[in-house]
Amino acid sequence: MNFTEKIAVGVKAAVAKLYDHEVNTENVMITNTRKDFAGDYTVVVFPFSKAAKKKPVDIGQEIGETLKTDLDIVADFNVVNGFLNLSIGNEFWLKFSQELFKVKHLGQAPANGKKVMVEFSSPNTNKPLHLGHVRNILLGWSCAQILNRAGYKVIKTQIVNDRGIAICKSMLAWQKFGEGETPTSSGIKGDFLAGKYYVMFEKKFQAEYKIWKETKEAKALLKEKIKKDQTEDAFWKSYKNTYFNDFSGLGSEAKEMLLKWEDNDPAVRQLWSTMNSWVYDGFEETYKAMGVDFDKLYYESNTYLEGKRIISDGLKKSVFYKKEDGSVWIDLESAKMDHKLVLRSDGTSVYMTQDIGTAQLRSEDYGMDKMVYVVGDEQDYHFKVLFETMKRLGAPYAEGLHHLSYGMVDLPTGKMKSREGTVVDADELIKEVVEVARKNMVERNEVTGKTVNDIEEIIRRIGLAALKFFIIKVNPKKRMVFNPNEAVDIQGQTGPYIQYAFVRAKGVYEKAIQDKVNLSLADNYSTLEPVEKELIFQISQYPALVITAAESYDPSLIANYCYGLAKAFNKLWHEVSILNAEQAETIAYRVKLSKLISETLKDGMKLLGIEMPDRM
RNA sequence: GGCUUUGUAGCUCAACUGGAUAGAGCACUUGACUACGAAUCAAGAGGUUACAGGUUCGACUCCUGUCAAGGUCACCA
């Protein structure tokens, strides 16, 4: 039982004894005492004033006195307004810390026997990964690690959007204008090569559109269809899709290709698998650079038909209904949503159909209890509908479905727009942060006695830590501004700051081992400085924090925690001497404390997908 | 327009889910290294928590309204 629990029980007993009033221990409000007041924990006594019929100050005084005599851990107390500040005796902090030193893997919850699947990244195969994917990937990866630490068995997955009209566009452009270019022949990374032809299609299409706009046919159409208050430009913009479908030569070629693909045309399928394999090689490189991997991939091309079976089952059970034109819908008005199409009138599947099918497939493969989708907040409604639909279909895991929704990443100049070329590409970004880390390392020129390979790895870890921490520290649901200059900062609230604290803490421990410090003397330590107590306190919070982060699917909690812990350790470093302390038991105690801190920092950062360097 | 998310220091973010005088970092000013590594620490300045009401012992947090920014309302994904 930890201190807060003991206090809660004590307060419950005190209130019963003093005021003959029952309170639930969960309702006893206990917070950490603010720095400006004396004490460790604070009990808020306002809620008892009704039952006690006394002033909060008096209640605090009475409960405080009772706790001081009845609870051994309470050494002292003071009352400010309705706040009862309790001080825990040093001997209990010391005893508590000795227990912490013995814990094998602090923060690792015992296995709970449950499986959770985490879907993240899920790119389209027609362009490279960009900054938006980076946030997605970091969130997904981190969430997977945190759930694992919280006791779940985790399966990391993605749904690869490898089919559809967009992919056909890049295929068509390559076929028409590519002249056989390959990643090998051009030296262009596969995903960028596919992206190049996707962009090329768009350009050629726009050129074609522009010429067409000057035809008589188009001008007549404009006259007929343009709305009042609409500029010509706005009209043509809104008309683009119709043009693509009804008039465009390139458009009909692309659509024809899609039909052939669905018909399993060998030539088209061949081209498709070739170009996709280029893209996968490119993605793999990016994932590797980011330090992430997946346990299982699902491809849309394999799952897009799967949903149909479930739809027809659902039709029989009247979960869905059919309109006269043959299209299938679900009525979600009773859940305060709309009617939603789940199957087109021509019998082909839509996005929703696929997601229903994929969920089912995954359940058959893994029988997961929970499923987390890491997808941007523009799809909030889609997932609301999907989850409600799965519930009505009676999926056993329906209650465990969760959409980890996150806000878009903006640049200081505004939104990222692929058409305006303001997209920050993932590979380039990673390269850039590593370069900044290298520049800093060179300036300092401090790592010695290491091979070039070691130094390269250290630089890589520092650069990535800066980037990853900058993104992951922000609460997922908030839109965030990504300023490239700040992302590579290595001072203050940053990844490298935490790495630095880690290197210090670990370094001290290693030196102590080298110097053959007798660590068992730590048991005799009895003074305990405030900074030390603060550290013990913070470390003790870690396991509960991991659970909270898992329950709320929020890695930013871990990030902010790690920063706080690193900060507290840096403070200790400056305030007291560790290896040069006067008493042998003080040295031993602080070395043990440093070791625990380094382990906790390393573990916390690992949950964020950030690796620690040995030296910096 | 309906629904929905966000709005906190000049900038980037916190605030233990309703608790004390709203905290950090960056930038700015000042101080601390022939070192258990200064990628650090200490101090200063910086706020009507978008605005207006309400709920109560107590509101950045909950409710109502207004304003601003984003998202979404496709037989697109």
Image (spheres, rainbow, N blue to C red):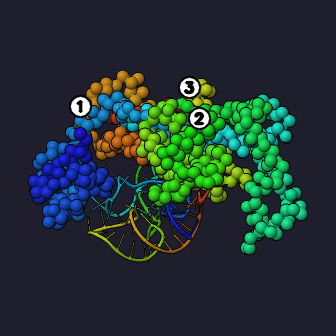
Disc on the earlier residue, 3 or 1: 3
Instruction: Give me the chain letter of mark 2.
Output: A
Q: Secondary structure at mark 2?
A: strand
Q: Position of residue A554 (x, y in %)?
A: 45, 46
Task: Name the kind of residue labelled 1 in the image.
Answer: Asn
Question: Which residue is pictured at 76% across the width and 45% down the height?
Answer: A255
Question: In this view of the protein, which residue sits in the foreground, B56 or A101?
Answer: B56
How far apart are the two marked residues, 3 and 1, measured between alpha carbons?
Answer: 37 Å
Do callouts 2 and 3 point to residues on the same chain?
Answer: yes
Neighbours of disc 2 within 10 Å: few (<14), some (14-19), many (20+): some
Residue under label 3: A449
Residue under label 1: A524
Asked which quadrant contains residue B55, the reply is: bottom left
Disc on the earlier residue, 1 or 2: 2
**Image depth: mark 1 or mark 2 in front:** 2
**Image depth: mark 2 or mark 3 in front:** 2
Q: Secondary structure at mark 3?
A: loop
Residue under label 2: A298
Question: Which residue is pictured at 85% across the width and 66% down the height?
Answer: A220
